[in-house]
Amino acid sequence: MRTKQFKSESKKLMDMMINSIYTHKEIFLRELISNASDALDKLYFKSLTDNSVGISADEFVIRIELDKEARTLKVIDNGCGMTEEELDKNLGTIAKSGSFNFKNDNEKAENVDIIGQFGVGFYSAFMVSDEVTVESKAFGSDSAFCWKSKGADGYTIEPCDKDTVGTVVTLKIRESTDDENYDEFLDQYRISALVRKYSDYIRHPIKMQFTTKKPVEGKEGEFEDVTEDRTLNSMIPLWKKDKKDIKPEDYNSFYREKFYDFNDPIKVIHTKTEGQATFNALLFIPEKPPFDYYTKEFEKGLQLYSRGVLIMDKCADLLPDYFSFVKGIVDSEDLSLNISREVLQHDAQLKLIAKTVERKIKSELEKMLKNERETYEKFFNSFGVQLKFGAYDGYGANKENLKDLLLFVSSRENKFVSLKEYTERMPESQNAIYYACGETREKIDVLPQTETVKAKGYELLYLTDNVDEFALKMLGEYDGKKFINVCDNDFDLADEDEKKELKEQNESSKDMLTAMKDELKEKVNEVRFTGKLGSHPVCLTSEGGISLEMEKVLNSMPGAKENAVKATLVLEINGTHPVTERLKTLYKNDKDTFNKYTRLLYDEACLISGKGLDNALEHSNLVCELMTK
């Protein structure tokens, strides 16, 4: 037996790696299985040109053995194995990768997926074990050797008895502590779950014996241990199969099982991209958002695989926020990983993949909108708010990318309409896109301005989501048509003669309107006559960038009380309504009652607009007083 020391730099690297590089101890199993898979691939590659290998492709296997009493976990493969020199070189020098050298030394191995690159994954075993033993017999060798180490102090290599080619890695699992549960790595169900999580698509079968208790036939209440061999991994990823060989129910079953959803996805996107960014992707658009989707706890991201091995469970960089509802998998052989294979290096390759994924999702949504309208509207009911947030977010950085995916309910048949559809069917006399905001369509319909728009034969967009007006304000216009809130001050459908007449009416009643403004004090910025109310007596409009609805939304946010936002309001009165003549008479003869009418009209305008009353009791008393006069 020869005892050797790790080089001093290797000791430092091992200590850093065990304590810093890997964030999850469970990752050790992925690394050992990946190394075993590499060994199988190397021997398989050799078998293509060497008949003496004597092992067919379907005989390559990885086995996991657990022994709770001895506290050991074994990963066994019948791959190429290692000689004494290779054990010393590959395991005695940290970051010496046999897989990396194999790829470099074998140009024809391009089509063989060798997972290991850095040679450090093996040492993750020391995160969960006190001692690691590696028994290996190389193909073509008559001798087997045993490498053993308890950590950074060093290792031994000596001959051992092993009849078959391959490698056995034995971990002596640590005792559990108050802070760490190491017993989980001796539990057959936990190990099975970790294999499915990280190594489900390793191309070779990963097998383990399961011991379960079954009733003894003919003996009620008695059970016996029954052992059976199970294959833990599915081996062939669904996304690498030919699409013509996959049935819709296969996609649906995969989605429900993989992403824990009771419903089938509303859309499946299965794509393979080659070129600058080469990868397979299997993406799903859910039918409904998860319960935490619109909360801070929700984490977006796609599962990221490299050659079938899970690298990240939720890679957020692969999805823009406005497509965060998409679930799925990306598998690439071209990723630049750090030495732990646990974190991506943020390079141009990842950005290329993300951009391609984004374009594909957008393209599929556009097709759905065009060819599967009912399905798209169902999708939009679930995730439309997220697309609107995307158009608004980042000062509208993505508004051009998203504007044609947005839908709004229209006054025409109360159905969804896209902005493109709205502008294409606008009358020639209409020069703007009109909208109104409110809690519901019914409340919007009772707005006085709504009646005016409909009377002109114009279509109105109902904005009932908090983000709606913010999104349209950010868009600014569509196809050269400005968005105009019918409750804004600049909404005006009057012709030139009507505008001239209205101007004269306001000038002739200037003193009275000023008196009304003074009575209402800071509540309004101006009081004036308008011709936009049809049969209604009064309304509130806003001027400037903040509308009444935006005021409500902004002031409902956490912390808004300290920095409350206030819309600049204008009280507008129908110059042709009987209430106008009553106001003029009271202004001349009864200033006190005139002031009460002014406050009452303002309160009525607040109620109609959905703003609510500042003082409901005062309003009630005022109504009762005027009713009894």
Image (cartoon, rainbow, N blue to C red):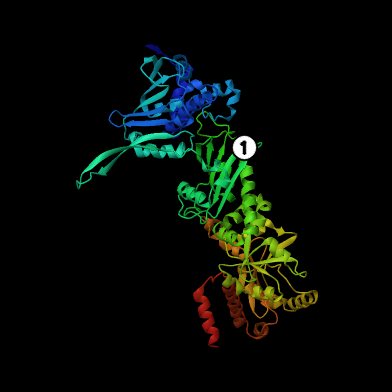
Looking at the image, which residue is at 60% across and 69% down? 523
Q: From the image, which quarter does the C terminus lie in?
A: bottom right
**Which residue reaches farthest bottom?**
629
Q: Position of residue 551 (x, y in %)?
A: 59, 62
Looking at the image, which residue is at 55% across and 42% down? 241
Looking at the image, which residue is at 39% across and 31% down? 63
Amino acid bearing label 1:
Thr
Q: From the image, which quarter does the N terminus lie in?
A: top left
Crowd rating for badge 1 (residues with CA inside 10 Å; few <14, some 14–19, many 20+)? some
Query: Quadrant of the rendered structure where residue 184 is?
Result: top left
Looking at the image, which residue is at 53% across and 88% down? 628
Asked whether, in this view, residue 468 is left or right of residue 227, the answer is right
The residue to which callout 1 is attached is: 278
528 shown above or below 252: below
Q: Position of residue 355 (x, y in %)?
A: 64, 43
Query: Quadrant of the rendered structure where residue 344 is?
Result: top right
Q: Position of residue 388 (x, y in %)?
A: 61, 56
In front here: 429 or 424? 424
Asked whether, in this view, residue 66 is left or right of residue 378, the answer is left
338 shown above or below 314: above
